[in-house]
Amino acid sequence: MSGFQTQPVIMQIIPELGPGGAEQGCIDIAAELVRGGAQAIVVSNGGHRIHELERIGAVHINMPVHSKNPVVMWRNVGALRKLINRYGVNIVHARSRAPAWSAHYACKKTSAHFVTTCHAPYNISGEAKKFYNSSIAHGERVIAISNYVAEYLRQHYKLDNRTIRLIPRGIPIEKFHPTAVTPERLITLAQEWRIPDSANIVMLPGRLTRWKGHMVLIEAMERLQKKDLFAVIIGSDQGRTEYRKELEEEIKQRGLEGRVRMVDHCNDMPAAYMLSTIVVCPSTDPEGFGRVPVEAQAMGRPIIASDHGGAQETILRGQTGWLVPPSDSNSMAMAIEEALSLTPTQRSMLATRAMAHVAENFTKAHMADRTLDVYAELLREEFAPSNGNRPFHGNQEQPIRMS
């Protein structure tokens, strides 16, 4: 491939297009690229969100990039290289470890730049695992979604600020805003959850996996012994039926059947946040970022999270929420008690601070702008829009640096 096209071609690679935060970020960036006049290509093993890419005008290409099988990964190298040459791809952006290996080698012998995003501090249980994880550190630029993740990259893969770019995840604040939720949506959800009128609701959103800390909330609910307090656990077990049964048995043994609800899925999370009195994230393992604390704050809801990982960067301690020791149900119960005791004025002040905090730091627009800045930094030139939309551009003089 010689030279650049009038507009850039960006290929993102992600294992599958499911419900996660990495997938949402991929779709958001594809939409922004198209809006700016660039060509957006997404390579994945498919998923129920392909139609979202088609709707925004992005190209989706099916490939088994989810596979960790070395033979399949090696085949993907050749297939990706053919796509790079066919579409004249300027930048390949890998968002997961297995596809990052294939993309890394596919970019060799082409003029395409290679970018990665590290979404989590991946577990290092030995040299083999450390080597496998290292694919995410091979990018010319490596995007870290939090300072916590950036420190992981510095410590284990010796990356420095010349390579790392800090870009927190962003949410659509036009969707996650109290005024965006109609009373009808609240009524529908309240009836579905069978929550008594005027009850206080503690909500824990997140897939049913052990490290999300569901047991911590259940133990805290037993400690509180408040008949007007209900907990709603929202999340699919994604096939982890044994863990779901374990939680259900724990709820029964502690006599909490009437006060703890388990909801398989919720299609209207903004309404769910609005119904809640308090949102909790009692993760026992640190999260790289964590969208729930940000979404809860955007909705003006008090948030209580474990004091580690990305939550330490998204929650203003004592101003927009509480950070409690991980796996400590007593501290969780005390924080819930404190949040319930807020006066209407205190709750309103907390909501105002939280919403302003998110609007200033964690919007989809901020994430998109900074990501496009990274692309433009590598391409070393600006691309003017071919229509009246916002141009694809970047600030070459002041690239995004770690704070």
Image: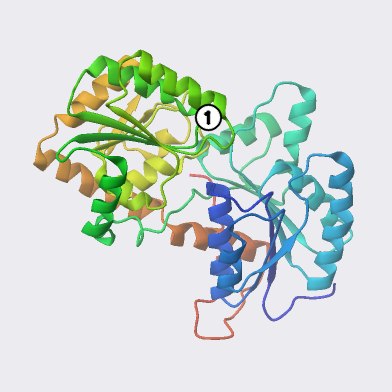
Quadrant position of residue 217: top left
Q: How many marks?
A: 1
Q: Could you tell me which quadrant the N terminus lies in?
A: bottom right
Relative horizontal placement of residue 251, taking residue 210 as reference (left or right)? left
Q: Is residue 187 above or below residue 246?
A: below
Q: Position of residue 108 (x, y in %)?
A: 86, 56
Which residue is the extreme one toward the bottom? 387
**Residue 285 can be seen in this image:** no
Quadrant position of residue 160: top right
Colour mapping: rainbow
The residue at the point 22 percent across, 46 percent down is 351
Relative horizontal placement of residue 83, taking residue 363 as reference (left or right)? right
The residue at the point 42 percent across, 25 percent down is 214
The residue at the point 39 percent across, 51 percent down is 361
Q: Position of residue 287 (x, y in %)?
A: 51, 33
Q: Position of residue 157 (x, y in %)?
A: 70, 34
Q: Residues within 10 Å of mark 1 (few under 14, many from 20)?
A: some
Q: Amino acid at mark 1?
A: Thr
Q: Position of residue 332 (x, y in %)?
A: 31, 22
Instruction: Identify which residue, 197 or 101, lies in the foreground.
Output: 197
The residue at the point 51 percent across, 41 percent down is 146
Residue position for label 1 = 209
Quadrant position of residue 376: bottom right
**Residue 34 can be seen in this image:** yes
Q: Check disc 1 and report its element: helix, strand or loop.
A: loop
